[in-house]
Structures are given as structure tokens and as C-alpha cells.
Amino acid sequence: MTIQIEMSGELRQVELTQLEEAGGYNASIDGRPPVPVSMQVLRPGVLSLVIGGKSYRCVLEESAEGTTVHLAGRRMLYRVDDPRSLKSRRRRHGGAEGPRPLTAPMPGRVVRVLAGVGDTVEAHQSIIVIEAMKMQNELKSPKAGKVARLRVEPGDTVAAGDVLAVIE
């Protein structure tokens, strides 16, 4: 399962692979090597995490600023974007403030990249073309802005929900 987590304004792509043990996962962040993670809910909003063999207490809370996580002595705003969730899809197409990811709606192969890092783009301008099931699909900018990050190049294979570019 691939999800996107925005922590303190930084967008991360997390690939989770469930292990046979209850609550156990391998987690890979932004393509880095996977790390074993296990989780147990202690009470609502409080988790016990073991990440790479080290234990952490994680507290989740809602505030006026948004949802925050307290982990390892740090307090961070966060937002989880699961591409399978209707709520996440609606939020992704919401307001134009802040960086916005351009995600792959389906698995496929990148055929063309039509804009580079630093290029100014208009809302709904084609940025990337992917081929899926012998059809080419143009992926368009979610807002007007500048291409801040480009994570693919022609020939790359992508999975549904992968972040292909970030528009600021």
C-alpha cells in the first residue's frame, strides 16, 4: 500500500508492506530501503511504535492548527493522503494553497515529461504522459504554479498513487 504523508509541509511517499505478524510492516519512505515497523494502539490517539528495533510513544491530537503527532520529542503537523480514500481524493482537488502533488491515478509507464523543474505551469496544463493498458493518459497540473519537484523520467514505471511531481 502506498500513502502520502505531509509532515510540517514536507510531502513524503510511504510504501507499507504488511508482515505476517500482527501490526507488523516494512516501511519505505521516498524509495529508501525498508525498515521494520510494528504498531500497537495503547488507547485512542496513543500508539506504541517499534521502528527499526527502537521503541517510541506516539500521541496524535486534533488542534486549531490541524492534526499533530508527538513523536521522539518533536511535535509535527501531519496529513495522510491515501489515494484509495474518497476523502483524500476530494481534498487533493480542493484549494490551491501550498504545494500540491501530481499523482499517478493508475499503474503505467511514463511516456513523456512535458514540463521540467522550475517551469511555470497553468492549472490543468499537461505535465506528464503515462501509458496504461495501451492508452496514453495526460496528467495535468492540479493548480497554477511552478514545478518544484519531478520524480520521474520517460521510461519509468509507476504505481497508482505514486507522486510524480510537486507543484508549488
Image (cartoon, helix red, strand yellow):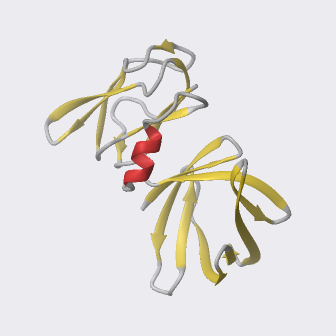
Residue for point 54% across, 18% down: 145
Q: Position of residue 60 (x, y in %)?
A: 69, 66
In the image, residue 143 sits, relative to residue 39, either above or below, namely above
The C terminus: image quadrant = top right
**Most foreground residue, 13 or 91:** 91
Residue 142 is left or right of residue 27, and the answer is left
Q: Position of residue 14 (x, y in %)?
A: 53, 56
The image shows a total of numbered marks equal to 0
Residue for point 43% across, 28% down: 142
Q: Position of residue 36 (x, y in %)?
A: 60, 73
Residue for point 76% across, 75% down: 57
Residue 124 is left or right of residue 71, and the answer is left
- Residue closest to the far left: 134
- Residue closest to the far front: 64
Q: Does any portion of residue 83 appear in the rendered image?
A: no
Residue for point 37% across, 17% down: 125
The N terminus: image quadrant = bottom left
Q: Does any portion of residue 67 appear in the rendered image?
A: yes
> Residue 127: which quarter of the image?
top left
Q: Position of residue 147 (x, y in %)?
A: 53, 22
> Residue 124: which quarter of the image?
top left
- Residue closest to the far right: 73
In the image, residue 82 sits, relative to residue 140, either above or below, namely below
Residue 50 is left or right of residue 17, and the answer is right
**Most foreground residue, 150 or 146:** 146
In the image, residue 73 sits, relative to residue 154, either above or below, namely below
